[in-house]
Amino acid sequence: MRTKLLIGTVSFVAIGFFLFQGLRIYTQGSCGQYPIFEPSCSELLSVAETQKLLQSSQSLVKEIKQINPGQIEVYVREQSHCSDKAIIVITHSTERDCNSLNEILRRNVFNVPYKTVNN
């Protein structure tokens, strides 16, 4: 009886641990910026304002793209669930880009929500 209880407890703890790790990886995801939930519509700027912000940040965009030339894209994506609202998306090809990407983003944060996606 004690053996079954011990095995059951260890199994429960192990399953809980792996579920938590999977959830943690999902919530942190790509470069620690991949939220489970998209930002609320009230946190987002209009599509035009977001595009204007991205245009005015071209030196930052250029620096980001130089991490892995040809493999990183920075663009504005309209949020389908928020009328005329958008988010900045940064796609990168490898997790090796994350340290450099995070370093640049920590120094030069966009003033609107953005997300990084490992393609």
Image (cartoon, grey):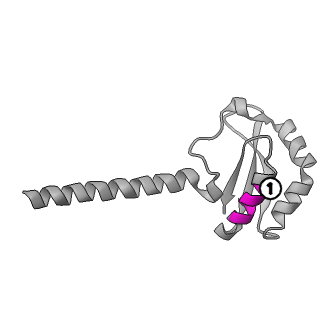
Question: Residue 76's x, y, as percent?
Answer: 79, 47
Q: Position of residue 111 (x, y in %)?
A: 80, 41
Pick the quarter of the image with the N terminus. bottom left
Q: Quadrant of residue 113?
A: top right
- At x 64%, y 67%, the residue is 95
Please name whichever residue, 111 or 70, is drawn nearer the observer in this view of the structure: 111
Classify mark 1: residues with Cα within 10 Å, few (<14), some (14-19) or many (20+): some
User: What type of secondary structure mainly makes up the magenta span?
Assistant: helix
Query: How many discs mark residues in the rendered view?
Result: 1
Whether residue 100 appears in magenta in the rendering, the answer is: yes
Q: Residue furthest front?
A: 107
Instruction: Name the residue furthest left.
Output: 1
Asked if 59 appears above or below 77 in the picture, the reply is below
Question: Residue 46 falls in which quadrant of the image?
Answer: top right
Could you tell me residue 13's position as x and y percent? 30, 55
111 and 73: which one is in front? 111
> In the drawing, does residue 18 fall left or right of residue 23?
left
Q: Is residue 51 magenta?
A: no
Please tell me whether residue 51 is drawn above or below residue 65 in the rendered image. Answer: above
What quarter of the picture does the C terminus occupy?
bottom right
Name which quarter of the figure residue 98 lies in: bottom right
Taking the spot 66% from the left edge, 33% from the top edge, the residue there is: 40
Nearer-the-camera pick, 94 or 84: 94
Q: Check disc 1 and give the amino acid type.
A: Val
Which residue carries the number 1 mark? 74
Callout 1 secondary element: strand
**Picture layout, residue 91 above or below residue 36:** below
Residue bounds of the magenta highlight: 99-105
Q: Which residue sits at x=71%, y=67%?
A: 97
Residue at the spot x=77%, y=68% of the render? 71
Q: Give the image location of residue 37, x and y in percent.
A: 58, 41
